[in-house]
Image (cartoon, rainbow, N blue to C red):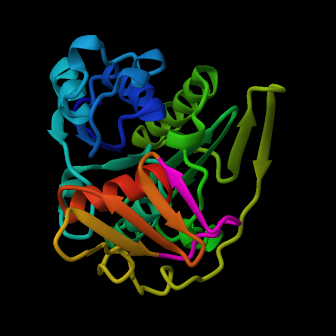
Amino acid sequence: MISKTVAIVGVGAIGNITTKLTSEEQINLILIDRDVVESHNLKNQPLYSKEDIGKPKAIVAAEKLKAKAYPEDLTFENINILDRADLILDCTDNLETRFLINDYCLKNKKPWIYAAGIKTKGTVMNFFPGEVCFRCIFKPVHGLDTCETSGIITEAATNIAFLQVSNALRTLSGEKVEKEMVRIDVKDNSLEKIKVKKQNCIACKGKYEFLEGKKQTKPTKMCGSNTYQIKEDFKIKEHFKIIKGITLFKDGRAIIKAKSEKEARSLYSKFVGN
């Protein structure tokens, strides 16, 4: 199976385990992640050690597994990184990137596998050209509950990763895989399969808003400082709320201290969620 190439987007909690498992199958790997290793990552991301703190996750993982690394924020501008991949594994923590991957895979007729988890729960679903797509199921929304802020326990991340990799290997081998969305909760050892139907959504009709850059979160730099404002549609009850140095306002604004627009967008996605 070494002739196959898999792109893994996100090498955090789930992506770390998915990457490690996939590398054992002699598959060519492309690793994409915009983040750096932090001390709290060490407890459930086995590819990293204390010596790696502060280094780009994608580079650290790629060096250890002899993979190709892209320490970047995947956007419509660099989406061609995925061109060489036969299959894309989504291990990200935000919807914006997933809608982008969905648009790309629809246009280029490539399969991809969605994997997400938070706390004790996780979801996995396989997407194939011509069938139900991610946007048939989910709508672009913004929230305050991300894996970065709420966390995911190691057992949940491991189970989700194992399921994703199992589906990936069967897909690459031409075997049949589940068409249903699979949801698990390790708290009560439950597994649920949910049937979903193709909705002939805007993406299915060939309108790729995320791939065209029309839906990308766009920070605005505030005059005379390294501060950016992002205006979205998240909801909070308080007049303002501070999360990891990001100030959120009731009217949907976020004020972020960052060195660049790219960093502001990354921080927003990481701690606020999109």
Q: How many labels were placed on the picture?
A: 0
Q: Decide whether the magenta segment is chiefly helix, strand or loop.
A: loop
On the picture, is 61 further left or further right than 252?
Answer: left
What residue is at 62 percent from the left and 69 percent from the top? Answer: 239
On the question of residue 190 being in view, the answer is: yes
Q: Which residues are magenta?
A: 232-243
- State the residue in front, 185 or 182: 185
Q: Position of residue 115 (x, y in %)?
A: 53, 44
Q: Is residue 233 magenta?
A: yes
Question: Is residue 162 rendered to the left or right of residue 231?
Answer: right
Residue 268 image-quadrant placement: bottom left
Q: How far across and how far down the image is residue 245, in percent?
A: 41, 49
Q: Position of residue 75 (x, y in %)?
A: 27, 64
Does 81 appear in magenta?
no
In the image, 62 versus 119, the foreground residue is 119
Viewer-nearest residue: 146 or 211: 146
- Image point (43%, 30%), residue name: 18
Q: Quadrant of the N terminus?
A: top left
Q: Nearer the viewer, residue 129 or 48?
A: 48
Q: Relative to 105, is 131 on the left or the right?
A: right
Q: Position of residue 100 (x, y in %)?
A: 38, 67
Residue 256 falls left or right of residue 200: left
Residue 49, placed above or below residue 161: above
**Residue under the point 72% across and 64% down:** 196
Res 113 seen here: no
- Quarter-of-image position of residue 150: top right
